[in-house]
Image: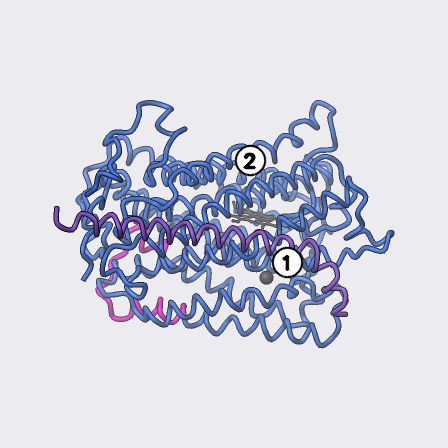
Chain colours: A blue, B purple
């Protein structure tokens, strides 16, 4: 009966295991390791930026170099760190959570991963070439190429970025199709859709979002390429094109993209809150519907990034209210998270700390996000440091805290070993303190009128920037602790049980830690 | 032994369903890509 799906029980040895990996656990580990590595590279780039901003005046970087660095920082963090890490989690966990032997398309899965290192190299090549006098450096047009005049006029860095976007898009699309096909076809008997763990739901919805918006972004990149080299004038105002069209295309992708980054975290947080409160997941149905509602609404609000671009008044008012409407399903989620811990028998192990930190910091990001789409105030806050502060509360406070919570929660499952709990807690508190030290001052500098995307600033912003830069250096340093914790855990952490955490629920915790190379070859029966 | 054919049938059905999904999703991607490229430059400016 199992003949058709029986494969070798042991992976090939050495490097070939990873190059030819089709096993979902191996690919999960690869994706997560790649995400972790990129987190530090993206972090290193921004350390240089914060060093420049430590004091007023230009000390270290030219403005052009500065722009390249924050652009690379952002592209690497979003597309290189968070998204691959979340994809690694889905690879490792979805088959375990739904009782499937593997992902549906294992070879495509291998391809989806191995595109990533090439994409990363492609993005960085022009950055390094400039030091040998070749070209004018990497793209400097922002994380979704939203500086339209640079898009059209800058040098080879933009062409490299365009091809990077195509490669990353291919990787995301294959990954997304794999998730949809796996979740819809590979569930164990009895695992109905409405019994699926929320993490699986969140990833299914994320996958649909990717499938809808990645082609738009890729097409926009292609149009940009033909504008730059093949004589078309989609975006070129001097020849009757429309630069605002590029803004629309980019943000039609860009806004759903922020939910693509956040949904996997929203899906996994309820698991962790439930475990450490020793209660079942609270408001399961409400959360599933809220995730769908956010997915749907996220396609209808893109122009809140363009409120100062001269839209008709009716459009501005529409985008303002549509954006604010997203806070309704988002509040449902926050309510359910609080419901999950309400009167629970809580304990505060590291994953729980990061999960609670996630709720608090993402909450700040969401609240500040309620202010920004107001058409009247947006005119003041747009392109100011208020925005930088806001979206780091969502991306770092939400995305990164979520990924950290997941890492600490499932690390013993992945490795079969416990990490050093004391150090984990220390890592959490250092991250919280320095994260806020970095990004609270940026909020006030922004309110006071400091624009973003500048390498130098007026003297009155000095104090805030000094504090923010110190915070950033310490935040960066304290992340090295995470490396130490993970290495120490893998090397000689004490053995973990299959259950790992006292209150943990879900199919993955019915398996030993680490789970054997092949799992659920005969599907479990789900009641 | 008895339900051997039934099992492979299930397996085949699942395989076919998977292929259909993949083809449908890839086509969907192609359509969105094409519409963005060909139609949106016409439609979006008309909104103003
Ligand atoms: C050590 C942690 C981090 C620090 C100190 C930091 C700092 C900064 C600063 C100062 C900027 C603005 C540069 C400027 O506008 O002149 C920036 C931009 C940005 N960062 Fe971060 N960041 C950190 C982590 C992250 C993470 C984890 C993400 C996402 C997952 C992220 C995503 C972005 C994005 C999308 C931009 C916008 C770039 C643009 O305007 O196009 N950052 N970061
Ligand atoms: Cu948005």
Q: Earlier in the sequence, mark 1 or mark 2?
A: 2
Distance in Å between CA atoms under marks 1 and 2: 23 Å
Q: Residue at x 30, y 58 (%)?
A: A271
Q: Is mark 1 within 8 Å of ligand 2?
A: yes
Q: Main structural element of the magenta stretch: helix, strand or loop?
A: helix
Residue at the far left in the pictured view: B1
- Quarter-of-image position of residue A16: top left
Q: Residues within 10 Å of mark 2 (few under 14, many from 20)?
A: some
Q: Where is residue B9 in the image (x, y as percent from the top left)?
A: 26, 51
Q: Quick check: is A204 in the magenta stretch? A: no
Question: Which residue is at the front of the view, A43 or B14?
Answer: B14
Q: Is residue A29 left or right of residue A298?
A: left
Q: In which quarter of the image is the N terminus of chain A?
A: top left
Which segment is the magenta one?
Answer: A333-356
Return the residue at label 2: A120
Return the residue at label 1: A251
- Quarter-of-image position of residue A280: bottom left
């Amino acid at each position: 009966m199992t003949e058709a799906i029986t494969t070798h029980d042991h992976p090939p040895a050495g490097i070939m295991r990873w190059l030819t990996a089709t096993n979902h656990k191996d690919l999960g580990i690869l994706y997560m390791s790649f995400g972790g590595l990129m987190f530090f590279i993206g972090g290193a780039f921004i350390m240089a930026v914060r060093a420049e901003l430590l004091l007023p005046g230009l000390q270290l970087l030219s403005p052009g170099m500065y722009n390249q660095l924050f652009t690379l920082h952002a592209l690497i963090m979003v597309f290189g760190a968070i998204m691959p890490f979340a994809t690694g989690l889905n690879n490792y966990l979805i088959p375990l959570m739904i009782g499937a032997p593997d992902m549906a398309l294992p070879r495509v899965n291998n391809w989806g991963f191995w595109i990533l290192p090439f994409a990363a190299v492609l993005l960085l090549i022009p950055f390094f070439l400039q030091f040998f006098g070749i070209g004018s450096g990497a793209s400097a047009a922002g994380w979704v190429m939203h500086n339209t005049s640079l898009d059209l006029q800058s040098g080879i860095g933009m062409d490299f970025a365009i091809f990077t976007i195509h490669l990353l898009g291919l990787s995301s699309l294959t990954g997304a199709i794999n998730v949809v096909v796996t979740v819809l076809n590979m569930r164990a008997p009895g695992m109905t859709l409405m019994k699926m763990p929320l993490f699986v739901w969140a990833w299914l919805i994320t996958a649909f979002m990717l499938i809808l918006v990645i082609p738009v972004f890729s097409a926009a990149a292609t149009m940009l390429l033909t504008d730059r080299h093949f004589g078309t004038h989609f975006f070129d105002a001097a020849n009757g094109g429309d630069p605002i069209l590029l803004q629309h295309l980019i943000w039609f992708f860009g806004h759903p993209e922020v939910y693509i980054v956040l949904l996997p975290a929203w899906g996994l947080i309820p698991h962790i809150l439930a475990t450490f409160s020793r209660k079942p997941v609270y408001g399961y149905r409400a959360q599933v519907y809220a995730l769908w509602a956010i997915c749907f609404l996220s396609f209808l609000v893109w122009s809140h990034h363009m409120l100062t671009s001269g839209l008709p008044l009716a459009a501005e008012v529409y985008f303002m209210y549509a954006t604010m409407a997203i806070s309704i399903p988002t509040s449902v989620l926050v309510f359910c998270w609080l419901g999950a811990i309400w009167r629970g028998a809580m304990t505060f192990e590291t994953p729980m700390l990061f999960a609670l930190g996630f709720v608090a910091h993402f909450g700040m990001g969401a609240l500040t996000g309620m202010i920004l789409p107001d058409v009247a105030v947006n005119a003041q806050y747009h392109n100011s440091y208020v925005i930088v502060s806001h979206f780091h509360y969502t991306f770092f406070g939400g995305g990164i805290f979520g990924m950290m919570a997941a890492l600490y929660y499932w690390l013993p499952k992945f490795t079969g070993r416990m990490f050093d709990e004391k150090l984990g807690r220390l890592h959490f508190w250092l991250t919280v303190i320095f994260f806020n030290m970095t990004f609270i001052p940026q909020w006030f500098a922004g309110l006071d009128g400091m624009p973003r995307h500048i390498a130098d600033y007026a003297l009155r912003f000095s104090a805030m920037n000094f504090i923010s830069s110190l915070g950033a250096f310490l935040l960066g340093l304290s992340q090295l602790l995470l490396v130490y914790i993970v290495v120490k855990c893998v090397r000689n952490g004490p053995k973990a049980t299959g259950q790992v955490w006292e209150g943990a629920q879900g199919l993955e915790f019915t398996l030993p830690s680490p789970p054997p190379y092949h799992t659920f070859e005969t599907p479990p029966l789900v009641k | 032994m008895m339900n051997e054919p039934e099992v492979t049938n299930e397996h085949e059905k699942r395989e076919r369903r998977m292929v259909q999904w993949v083809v449908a999703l890839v086509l969907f991607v192609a359509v969105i890509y094409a519409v963005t490229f060909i139609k949106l430059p016409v439609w979006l400016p008309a909104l103003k």
